[in-house]
Image (spheres, grey):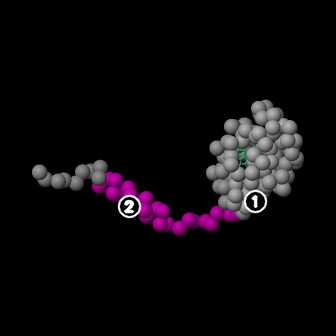
Amino acid sequence: MKLSRSPQASATRALAAAVATLSAVPALSTPSADGDAAQAFRSACGPCHSINLGHRIGPSLVGIDGRVSGTAPGFDYSVAMKKAAIRWDAATLERFLAAPGAVAPGTKMAYPGLNDEARRRAIVGYITGLRFD
Ligand code: HEC
């Protein structure tokens, strides 16, 4: 039996080579600090929180700076979050993100907490900057 190179195999190899070339090209611009924070937010919080007025699994975080916990209109909070009545600012947000269940015991935010302090600070800086347009 004679082995022949299948067209699929060579297409796959060509694609793999193209991908390798692409990932070897350095980024055209260095992401700004804000870009990094936005990215950190998207990966850690984005699946549950939007940065527009729509709620997802969690409430919208637009306007979170200065808001009292459990008060975004139209979101069904846990009793725990409403009772906590925390005024969100950079300090309270940082404590909450480090250990949500310790700061608001009984919260339904299914997130274990973010240990990386620099990342936490970047995310807090990002969400406290979210404003209504
Ligand atoms: C698995 C989904 C999920 C993830 C991931 C998540 N959250 Fe939440 N978050 C929620 C839910 C649900 C609530 C409402 C909690 C309650 O009512 O007890 C909430 C509540 C909050 C609140 C309080 C909001 C208010 O209006 O009082 C803040 C602030 C918050 N989340 C920030 C974050 C940040 C920042 C991240 C990323 C580091 C994050 N959350 C990750 C689901 C999530």
Residue 35 image point, x, y percent: 68, 59
Give the class, few, some or many, for how many residues have Cα within 10 Å of label 1's Cα (few <14, many ≥20): some
Q: Is residue 33 covered in magenta?
A: yes
Q: Is residue 51 above or below residue 31?
A: above
Residue 23 image point, x, y percent: 48, 63
Is residue 50 visible to the viewer in this orientation of the structure?
no
Q: Is residue 48 above or below residue 19?
A: above
User: Does residue 13 appear to the left or right of 62 in the view shown?
Assistant: left
User: Does residue 21 appear to the left or right of 102 in the view shown?
Assistant: left
Is residue 83 visible to the viewer in this orientation of the structure?
yes
Q: Is residue 90 covered in magenta?
A: no
Q: What kind of residue is marked 2?
A: Ala
Residue 53 image point, x, y percent: 75, 39
Q: Is residue 126 above or below residue 84?
A: below
Give residue 55's quadrant in the image.
top right
Predominant secondary structure, magenta span: helix
Residue placed under numbered mark 1 in the picture: 121
Q: CB under 8 Å between callouts 2 and 1?
A: no
Which numbered dot is residue 17? Answer: 2
Span shown in magenta: 10-35
Assign the C terminus to one quadrant of the image. top right
Give residue 10's quadrant in the image.
bottom left
Give the class, few, some or many, for how many residues have Cα within 10 Å of label 2's Cα (few <14, many ≥20): few
